[in-house]
Amino acid sequence: IILIYGREKVGKTTIATSFEKSLLLAFEKGYNALSGVMAQNIHKWSEFKQVLKQLDKPEVRERFKTIVVDTVDLAYDSCESYITQRESVDKIGDIPYGGGYAMVKKEYDDALRSIPMKDYGLVMISHATEQTVTLEDGTEISRTTTTLNKRAKAIVHPMADIIGYAKAVERDGESKVALFLRATPQFDAGSRFKHV
């Protein structure tokens, strides 16, 4: 289970769709310039749920090994819209006692976790943003992290076995994309795997 995030046009979708037998579930259509990508556009949460059901079919299992969700931010927004429509409210906070937020959390978490539970690899994509954080000594620094809102982040970050920060770097006079897999004070990243 991998989360890749970075600036716009850095190559997140290219990296994500290079995993073996990938199917891109596109909540945003950011794959137009990529050739050979198998993609399914997702316009609403009910379509996403329908695709998840189809992942159980033997012919789908033969064809795909990795499911890419681009972006998990938009997936969360779509899930929240689904719950507000289902519950006939204007906004999720209209459901009393925080019940709406709990419904979205369960729906979103269950859907994402169902993918690896079906024995598919899961690659999630998000964008990058800067946040000001205060270190223990009181120093304020700028830290790069995902654009996920706090509720989505509380689900996605702990779920990921690897969080990779994709960043353009200069190497030998060429611009290349590096995927950083260990956190620094300047950006979020990490891995559960000892030797990564």
Image: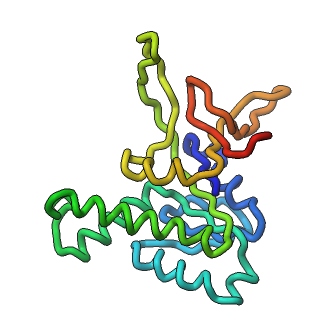
Judged left or right of residue 153, residue 65 is right
Question: In the image, residue 156 lies at what x, y percent?
Answer: 50, 53
Identify the image quadrant of the C terminus: top right
Question: In the image, residue 41 lies at what x, y percent?
Answer: 52, 72
Question: In the image, residue 121 lies at what x, y percent?
Answer: 68, 65
In this rendering, the answer to whether 179 lies above or below 56 is: above
Q: Residue at x 74, y 80 (%)?
A: 63
Judged left or right of residue 4, residue 18 is right
Q: Residue at x 82, y 26 (%)?
A: 173
Question: In the image, residue 136 lies at what x, y percent?
Answer: 45, 15
As drawn, which residue projects farthest toward the bottom?
58
Judged left or right of residue 98, residue 125 is right
In this rendering, the answer to whether 69 lies above or below 88 is: above
Q: Residue at x 64, y 39 (%)?
A: 190
- Of residue 79 and residue 173, the one placed in the foreground of this image is 79
- Res 31 quadrant in image: bottom right
- Of residue 40 and residue 103, the one placed in the foreground of this image is 103
Please, which colouring scheme is shown? rainbow
Identify the image quadrant of the N terminus: bottom right
In this rendering, the answer to whether 50 lies above or below 13 is: below
In this rendering, the answer to whether 35 lies above or below 5 is: below
Q: Residue at x 73, y 37 (%)?
A: 178
